[in-house]
Image (tube, grey):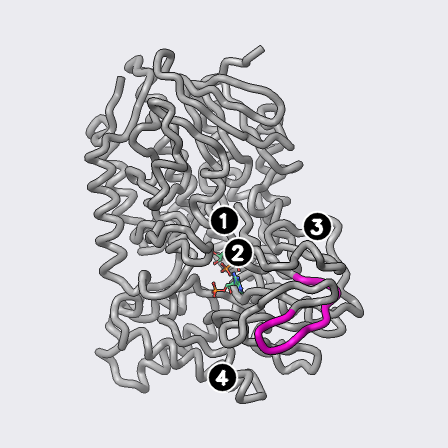
Amino acid sequence: MTRDLDAVVVGAGFAGLYMLHRLRGLGLAVRAFEAGSGIGGTWFWNRYPGARCDIESLEYSYQFSDELQQEWEWSERYATQPEILRYLEHVADRFDLRRDIELGTRVRAARFDEASARWSVDTERGAVSARFLILATGCLSAANTPRFPGLERFDGTTYHTGRWPHEGVDFTGKRVGVIGTGSSAIQSIPLIAEQAAHLFVFQRTPSYSIPAHNAPLDPERVRQVKSDYAAFRGRNAQLPFGANFPPGEHAALQVDPAERAREYEARWQQGGLGFVTAFADLLVDRAANETAASFVRDKIRSLVRDPAVAEALSPRQVIGCKRLCVDTGYYAAFNRPNVTLVDVAAAPIEEILADGLRTARARYALDCIVFATGFDAMTGAALAIDIRGRGGRALREKWAEGPRTYLGLGTAGFPNLFFITGPGSPSVLSNMVPSIEQHVDWIADCIAWMRARRFDAIVATESAEDAWVAHVNEVAGLTLFPSCNSWYLGANVPGKPRVFMPYLGFPPYVQRCNEVAAKGYDGFALG
Ligand code: N01
């Protein structure tokens, strides 16, 4: 028998948990379906050594409940994966969310029925029907494993950082290969290097990484923030990335080289992603950007003893164009005698062998391969579900040339379907948790507004969507972001259309969403 619900939420990470909480608060019958055997989303799956957040824990947390944010005690500046997962488990218990979550239940397909204006949702454990379908499937959740020839022949063990075994992995005495040098690799390499007999790092593009300077949280700072948490959140929400990265007031080339160096050094000592907001023009002016990039390259030279290795680790692309990384001991790991950097841009990986892998230049004997090769970002998880809108049209077909949304919240032709932090919203270019809360609140308020007026359906209009897609591209085009091969552009997944997916600018985005709602959901058709 098909169960009739008001809403289905797909995913039980930060987004799905809060969406469930808000909709239940409106008195709706809601179920959340989660593919994992536990809640937590990203923080359930990414259990690789060193996995932690690179937004400060006092900000990477919910603000919807002041009691919650007052009572929870984070232990470190940047929280570890286990601590964040414990926090989410606490939230699920505190707000009694578990009774409406079905774990181990992947959503396979969803079809919109025009006559009833409802979604038929097909899960691994049966079908349900719901007025609203809300994808809380995450931006970085569909793991990307390149199809290297011969992978099935490998006699050793393979891992993906985003699908790490729950029991952990002991690399003691093993010859390990890590493929990739993005954030996940940069966090895990120093720890894997401490265990492995030998670690080979297969690097295609070097990343810029800023030290975390992680430490236990200073109780005085916690007391200060908690004494007026709302003001702290409010200030951060006004900053371009919606996070506490203090914006530099000057343009980099307006100040003299000595002052620039002082500012970069201060930000380097402070640590974290705020390095890239040192000057106002770093992400829009190539010459300005180069001053920051060359500062980091100098740091790499000072940290890595072998000049040839330092050179190979030094990125040439614009800094910040690919997601900036934050590390603890990454560059220094390459001073260890048991760590070898292999340049697979110059000599690509050609095949996986039974006992290792072969590049165009050499063979490497390996017991384990760690794929730190990232995700089919922003669209992968949504498109893994066969979603059919009006006229049976597939979302996969509609987005074949790249995702198209209105505000990253909805897409024309697919009524009553909402995305949380979808493509076309600030999402990965903002502090994810406040962005999630903003989307969830907007969606919940919209549903409450519709119910009060007895509307059954809401859908983005083609013209509003076209204008929004053009605007997202226009804003990105004013910056240096489209200048390199990043996952923001889908460039890491072979064959994926090259479209800049996130929207730049948290404060103007929030203002626009509020205006749209205040005007009776301007740009959406209601029926
Ligand atoms: O993935 P990535 P990630 N042959 O896509 C390489 C968030 N995150 O999991 O750059 C050889 O960044 C690829 O090379 P290239 C954060 O937003 C946050 O590390 O495409 N190499 C790249 O080096 C982050 O940005 C934290 O040339 C191949 C690497 O694999 C996002 O998640 C921690 C290859 C993939 O890097 C993704 O990070 C971790 C091939 N065929 C993640 N294919 C925090 O700290 C890919 N690569 C919060």
Residue 296, percent from left and from top: 43, 78
Q: In terms of sequence position, does the residue under pointer 4 or pointer 1 come before the other?
A: 1
Identity of the amino acid at label 3? Pro
What SS does tag 2 mark? loop
Question: Is the CB of mark 1 within 8 Å of ligand 1?
Answer: yes
Residue 169, percent from left and from top: 74, 57
Q: Which residue is mark 3?
A: 165
- 145 with respect to 419 (left or right): right
Q: In terms of sequence position, does the residue under pointer 2 or pointer 3 come before the other?
A: 3
Q: Which residue is mark 2?
A: 374
Q: Using the numbered discs, state the Cα–Cα distance from disc 1 to disc 2 in whole angstroms.
A: 8 Å
Task: Indicate yes or no whether the magenta region holds residue 487.
Answer: no
Q: Which quadrant, please, contains the C terminus?
A: top left
Q: Is residue 83 visible?
A: no
Q: In terms of sequence position, does the residue under pointer 1 or pointer 3 come before the other?
A: 1
> Which of the 4 image quadrants contains residue 329?
bottom right
Q: Which residue is mark 4?
A: 311
Question: Is the CB of mark 2 within 8 Å of ligand 1?
Answer: yes
Residue placed at 19% from the left, 29% from the top?
519
Residue placed at 59% from the left, 52% from the top?
162
Label 2 neighbour load within 10 Å: few <14, some 14-19, many 20+: many
Q: Which of the two marks, 1 or 2, is nearer to us in this view?
A: 2
Identity of the amino acid at label 4? Glu
Q: Using the numbered discs, state the Cα–Cα distance from disc 4 to disc 1 in whole angstroms.
A: 30 Å
